[in-house]
Amino acid sequence: MKDKKFLISIVFLSAVGYFVLFEMPEMRRKANSGNQTIGTIISTSSGLRNSTPSVKYKIKVNSRIYTGSKSVSTNLYTYLEPGEEYMVKYELDNPENSILKLEEPYLNPVVSYQITFAQPHLPEWLNPNVVEFEYHVGEKTFKRRQDFGDRDIDEYLNKKYRVYYQENNPKIAYIFLDSVVSVE
């Protein structure tokens, strides 16, 4: 019985290893070499016990709707809202193979955005790709976290930036690192 469990464990670990070493990089390569379109977050899931939170998104390619999902950190998940739009890379011959680019928010010209200002900082939990910022709309203060991908965030701290927030839903807001307005 022990030999059977051991053999099953070896087969399972080999399959996982193969997927991680060969399939995942190939999927990423294909998605990163494909086209880009706009993706809309349609739902968030906190994940079941011991699982990673995720967001579900949709894209439209050649008049057809495709959905995808992306695992996200717990600390970023709580700040994502259905209706947010981000760029999505997808495989040309298989749009179902796509990657939501949370580091590339999309400002939809059909949606009305207003501008305020904020200074990003690193949250207590040191994720080097995510910044946190607070911004004010009227008398209300909002807190937001945003993924910035592989950028070296340190060079962007201690500066004030424009924050674009949706007029009809101010919880949806983005900070763009090329919009510096002052250095502190």
Image (cartoon, grey):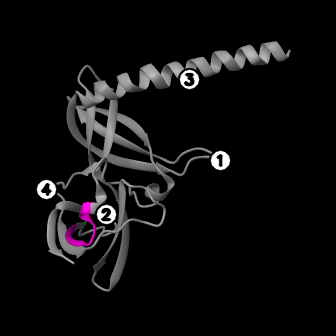
Q: Name the residue under label 1.
A: 49
Q: Earlier in the sequence, mark 3 or mark 1?
A: 3
Q: Name the residue under label 3.
A: 16
- Measured along the vertical axis of the image, is residue 118 above or below residue 77? below
Q: Which of marks 2 and 3 is in front?
A: 3
Is mark 2 in CB contact (under 8 Å) with mark 1? no
Element type at mark 3: helix
Give the CA separation, mark 2 to mark 1.
28 Å
> Which residue is located at x 22 percent, y 27 percent?
34
Residue 72 location (% of width, % of height): 45, 48
Relative to residue 141, is residue 2 drawn left or right? right
Query: What's the mark number on residue 172?
Result: 2
Relative to residue 54, is residue 15 drawn left or right? right
> Which residue is located at x 37 percent, y 36 percent?
67
Query: What's the mark number on residue 109?
Result: 4
Q: Give the range drawn in magenta.
A: 155-163
Q: Nearer the viewer, mark 2 or mark 1?
A: 1
> Which residue is located at x 73 percent, y 13 percent?
7
Disc 3 residue type (three-letter) = Val
